[in-house]
Image (cartoon, rainbow, N blue to C red):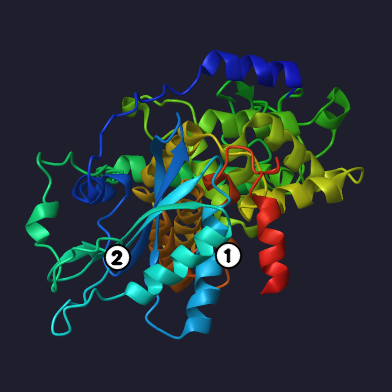
Amino acid sequence: MSQKRSRERRIQSGQRPRRAPQIVRATGPEDLLRLVPDLLPLDPEDSLVLVLFKRSHGTKSRTHGAMRIDLRHTEDPEQLDEWAAVVLGQVLRVDGVTGVAIAAYTPETFAPSGRPPAAAQVRAVSRRAQRLGLEVLDRFCVAADGWGSLDDPRLPRGGNPLALLDPDERRAPRRAPLAQPEPAAEEQIDRFADHYEQWWSRPEGPGGVLHGVPLGDPAPTSGSVTPGSAFGPASMLSLLQLPPDESAMDRYRWGRDTDAVVDLVEGILQPHDEHGRPCACRALLLSLVVRQGLIGLLLAQVAWGPAFGKEVWTAVSAPAGRQRSLERMTAAIGGGRFRRPDPDRIDAAIAALHEVASYVDTDRTGAGIDEALSWLHWACGGSSAAAALAGRALERHDDRDIAPIVLGKVQRGELPAWAYRTNPAKADAFEALLEPQRAAG
C-alpha cells in the first residue's frame, strides 16, 4: 500500500475522541487519597502508589496519572535504595512530570507500636525523588487499621480512621473486561473449519473476493486459478502449468503478494456484520497467530497500521533493508522506543480474537490466541490481564515466542516505553538526570 493511500485511510478513520478531563479539587490529604483508586485500574493492595503531578500555573499542580508497583518487603537500606532507583526510573520516563505524592498501601497495621508501617519504603522513594529534582507533595501510609501522612506532625498514634477515606459519592464502575462471545452455532464452527483448511490447502485460499481483495477462483474446466488475483498465478502462462502446490499461507509465510497481505489484515479490523459470521478473514487471523514466524508481523500491523505492516511484510522476502525493518519490528513488539500504538485498532483485534476463540478450542490454537491477546493487553498497559493470558498460553504450548517476553516484562514491572510518552524516541528532559544516578549506582 502506498504512503498516500495509507495517509488517506488514516484521515478517513478520524481521530479517537478525547474524554473531557474530570476536575477534582483536593484540599487536603483525604481528598487526594480518595482519588487514588480512580486513577488506577484496580484497588491498591500491598502496593506502592505514586500519584504523578505536573506543574500548571504558579504553585498549582495537576495530577498526571498514577503508577502502582508491588510493595517491597524489606527495611534494608541498600535494597530499598536500589528498589527506589528502579521506581523513580519509571516515573521520570513520564512526559512532563514535576512532582509526586507517595502512598504505601499495606496489610500491616499501626498497632501495636502506633507508628505507620511501610514508612521505610516511602522514605526511600521520597529521598530518591528529591535527589532527582522532583517535588514530593506528600508521603502517606494506608494500613489495615488506619492511615496517615508522614509529614503530619499531629498524626495520632495508630493513625487516622480509615472511614475518612471513604468516597463522598459512589464510584463509577470499573471498565468491564471485553465480554466473551456467545458460543458459536455448529454450522458456524463447521464453516470456520472449512475456511481454515482452505487457507492452508489451496493456493487461492477460500477464493472469491475478500474485503476487496480478489483471491482467485479455480477455473471450472482446468482446475487452474484465475490470473491477476492476489494468490493465484500472475500471468496467462501460468494457467498452462499445473496449479502450484503451495497454499495461500505459504505465500504469507514468505511475504509474497504483500499488498494483498496488508489489505486483508486491515480487513480483519473492519466492522463485521454479526449475521455473516464467520468471515473467512477470521480463519486467516487464526492462521497468522498460530505460526511463530507470522504472529509478530500481524501484531506489528495491527498496532501501528498498514504502512508499518507493509514494511515488515516486505522485509520477510526483500534482502535490501530487511535487517533494519526486522530490528524495528523487534523493538516495537518488545515495547521499546517506538511510537504509541493505535488503541482503536488494538480493541478491534481483541474483539476479533475473542470471536475466533468461540469457533475453535485446541491447545495449539488456544495458545496462539492467548499469546496475541496477552501482547495486545500489555501494549495498552493491562499488565494483570497480559500476565494471565501469557501464562495460560505457555501452559497450553510451552514453545511460544512472544508470551515469555510479555510474562517476563510483567513480572519485572516493565511497561512499554509508549506507556510513559506518546513518542518515546524523542528524548525527555529528565533522562539526563538518570545517567549520573545509573553511573553512581
Q: Quadrant of residue 242?
A: top right
User: Considering depth in this image, is 107 or 220 the residue closer to the camera?
Assistant: 107
Q: Residue at x 73, y 70 (%)?
A: 439
Give the quarter of the image for residue 58: top left
Q: Position of residue 73 (x, y in %)?
A: 37, 80
Dot 2 amino acid type: Leu
| Amino acid found under the numbered disc labelled 1 | Ile
Query: Which corner quadrant of the image does residue 209 belong to?
Result: top right
Judged from the image, the secondary structure of the residue bearing numbered disc 1 is helix
Q: 289 or 371, which is in the foreground?
A: 371
- Point out residue 158 in the picture as x, y percentages from the top left corner: 13, 73
Name the residue located 77 percent from the left edge and 52 percent from the top edge: 327
Q: Is residue 434 above or below residue 282?
A: below
User: Among all residues in the image, which is located at the extreme right?
Assistant: 320
Asked whether residue 408 is in view, the answer is no
Q: Which of the numbered marks, if any, corresponds to residue 16?
A: none
- Image quadrant in which the N terminus is located: top right
Does residue 126 appear anywhere in the picture? Answer: yes
* Precedes in sequence: disc 1 or disc 2: 2
Q: Disc 1 versus disc 2: distance between alpha carbons?
A: 39 Å
Q: Which residue is mark 1?
A: 405
Is 414 situated above or below 284? below
Q: Is residue 427 left or right of residue 100?
A: right
Residue, far front: 153
Q: Which residue is mark 2?
A: 150
